Image (cartoon, rainbow, N blue to C red):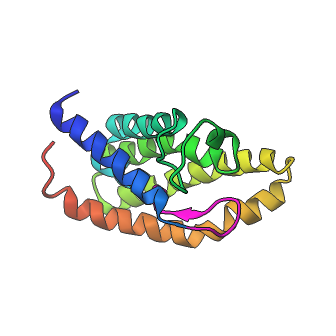
Amino acid sequence: MKAREIAYTALFIALTAVGAWIEIPIGPVPVTLQVLMVLLAGLLLGARLGFITMLLYVLAGVVGFPVFSGFSGGLVHLYGPSGGYIIAFPLAAYITGWFAEHWENTRGYLIGSLLAIGVIYLLGWLRLSAFLAWDTRKAFILGVAPFIGVDVLKALIAVGITEKVRKVMEY
């Protein structure tokens, strides 16, 4: 990896941790800014580096660094109600990055972001369903439905930031 890639990776790991610490508890899964940072990592760093960055973020949390919501870390988070969402972050960053690399326009950024959110919801919903004794309806009501509007807003914000920042970033 180049020095610039290492710096961007470290920056986005830190930004994602800060995004996790900004939370609104609304149930078993809080509203945080993690999804915004995951989308930005993919959109600005590309598929490969976005994936690596989010994978390193997840690994940092798993080994105990307090990068998850509530200033916490540890493997227990992957088994908890929000574990599926966290596990989806690298794949979501890859998806947004792929679209950003192949469709370098607002439409591509937005489609990639919305698909990435869909993947986060799918894996999060499945893990939350398992946590709730496979009550898939309750898991959807608690872990997906309350987040749709705010996450679409995060996608729009990520696209807007990406359009501004990509003009000045060197690749």
Residue 38 placement, left or right of 7? right
Residue 37 placement, left or right of 160? right
Is 26 part of what is drawn in magenta? yes
Corner quadrant of residue 57: top left
Is 36 part of what is drawn in magenta? no
Residue 6 placement, left or right of 32? left
Residue 89 coordinates in the image, percent (x, y): 50, 45
123 is higher (above) or lower (below) than 18: above
Q: Residue at x 70, y 51 (%)?
A: 125
Q: Residue at x 38, y 34 (%)?
A: 52
Q: Residue at x 73, y 50 (%)?
A: 128
Pick the quarter of the image with the N terminus.
top left
Residue 91 coordinates in the image, percent (x, y): 50, 40
In this view, the residue in front, 71 or 139, is 71
Q: Please tell me whether the stretch drawn in magenta is mainly helix, strand or loop.
A: loop
Residue 169 coordinates in the image, percent (x, y): 15, 51
Residue numbers of the magenta segment = 24-34
Q: Residue at x 30, y 40 (%)?
A: 9
Residue 144 placement, left or right of 169? right
Residue 40 coordinates in the image, percent (x, y): 35, 54
